[in-house]
Amino acid sequence: MEEIHRRIPHRSPFLFVDRIVEINDEDATCELKIREDLDIFDGHYPNNPLFPGVLSCESVFQTGAIFLSQKIGEVALNNESVTPVLSRIRDARFKRMIKPGDLLEIRVFLQEQIGKFYNLRGEIRLKNKVATTVSFALALVEETPNS
């Protein structure tokens, strides 16, 4: 978990990556175990708990931020004034329901970089079958001090 915290600013209760499996020049793979005790299941849905699609997308976006932290290098990792921010979501598809207890394999692929914008494609696999796909863009945003 320390490695994840070092790479991205997300923290509990809005951290949806448990483990970094692999990062290389073209892609990154992470995992998330869907805990049965998540408060979200109290309302989504009490008699048929499903992990929300928007949160499965968020786990892909966070994996993308982890990938980007590797891509931009160690210097940027410690620069708290730069934050990877979601700037575009395209073509999200939900092919399988994600339930409490599931182990998700989350993978992102770099498609192209245009300036400070990184276009990526991501997928979640559940038991080696595609559950979610989404294309998205992350931007490196410099924080401005509050006045």
Image (cartoon, rainbow, N blue to C red):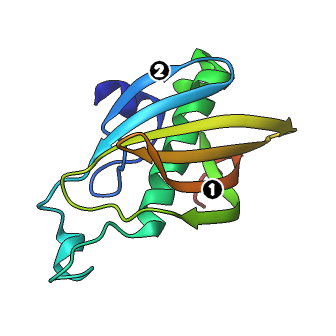
Q: Amino acid at mark 2?
A: Glu
**Crowding near the residue tagged with mark 1, few <14, some 14–19, many ≥20 C-alpha atoms within 10 Å:** many
In x, y percent, where is residue 96?
43, 62
In x, y percent, where is residue 58?
48, 57
Name the foreground residue: 93 vs 138.
93
Pick out the residue farthest to the left. Answer: 37
Where's the C terminus, which quadrant?
Answer: bottom right
Q: Is residue 51 left or right of residue 6?
A: left
Q: Is residue 46 left or right of residue 34?
A: left
Q: Which disc is residue 134 wearing?
A: 1
Q: Is residue 46 left or right of residue 22?
A: left
Q: Residue at x 35, y 50 (%)?
A: 15
Pick out the residue farthest to the right. Answer: 114
Name the foreground residue: 97 vs 23.
97
Q: Which residue is mark 2?
A: 22
Q: Residue at x 70, y 64 (%)?
A: 91
Q: Which disc is residue 101 wearing?
A: none
Indicate the quadrant where residue 72 lies: top right
Element type at mark 2: strand
Indicate the quadrant where residue 79 lies: top right
Q: Is residue 55 above or below residue 81?
A: below
